[in-house]
Image (spheres, rainbow, N blue to C red):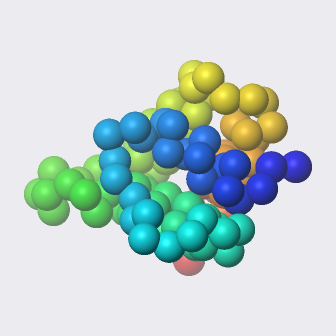
Amino acid sequence: MNTFVQLFEAYRSLWSNRSFIKDEELTEECCKSLLYEAIEKELRDEMTHPRTRQSPEIKFYYAIKRIINADLSEQEKLSLIHIYISVMEQIKE
């Protein structure tokens, strides 16, 4: 099982052009919070102008495709996909 620190690093490797807050020490809880927050922002397409935003379903599709094609371990891929599904379910409630 991967730790949230490992999963956060794996997520960051998928999005090398994005900056994340580094002021805090990267503890398990901090990384979990940052990871869920970043994925929610991504699925809601919050970093795009409101007129050109895509639906969470489309963003989810692209994210899963990116994870599958990434140079990550199978366990990291499955763990990240599981988190994406969890966040997507929260968005859809």
Q: 93 or 21, which is in the foreground?
A: 21
Q: Quadrant of residue 71?
A: top right
Q: Residue at x 40, y 65 (%)?
A: 21
* Residue 71 visible in the shown view: yes
Residue 46, image x, y percentages? 28, 63
Number of marks present in the image shown? 0
Q: Position of residue 91 (x, y in %)?
A: 51, 70
Residue at (41, 47) in percent of width and height: 59
Q: Is residue 36 left or right of residue 29?
A: left
Q: Nearer the viewer, residue 20 or 45?
A: 20
Residue 42 vs 30, above or below: the answer is above
- Give the position of the C terminus as an image quadrant: bottom right
Q: Image quadrant of residue 73?
A: top right
Q: Position of residue 6 (x, y in %)?
A: 69, 49
Tell me if residue 55 can be seen.
no
Instruction: Please state if 8 lies on the left or on the right of 19 as rendered.
Output: right
Q: Which residue is pictured at 60% across the width and 65% down the height?
A: 26
Furthest residue toward right: 1
Q: Is residue 92 above or below residue 65?
A: below
Residue at 67 percent across and 56 percent down: it is 5
Asked if 75 appears above or below 24 in the picture, the reply is above
Q: Nearer the viewer, residue 19 or 23?
A: 23
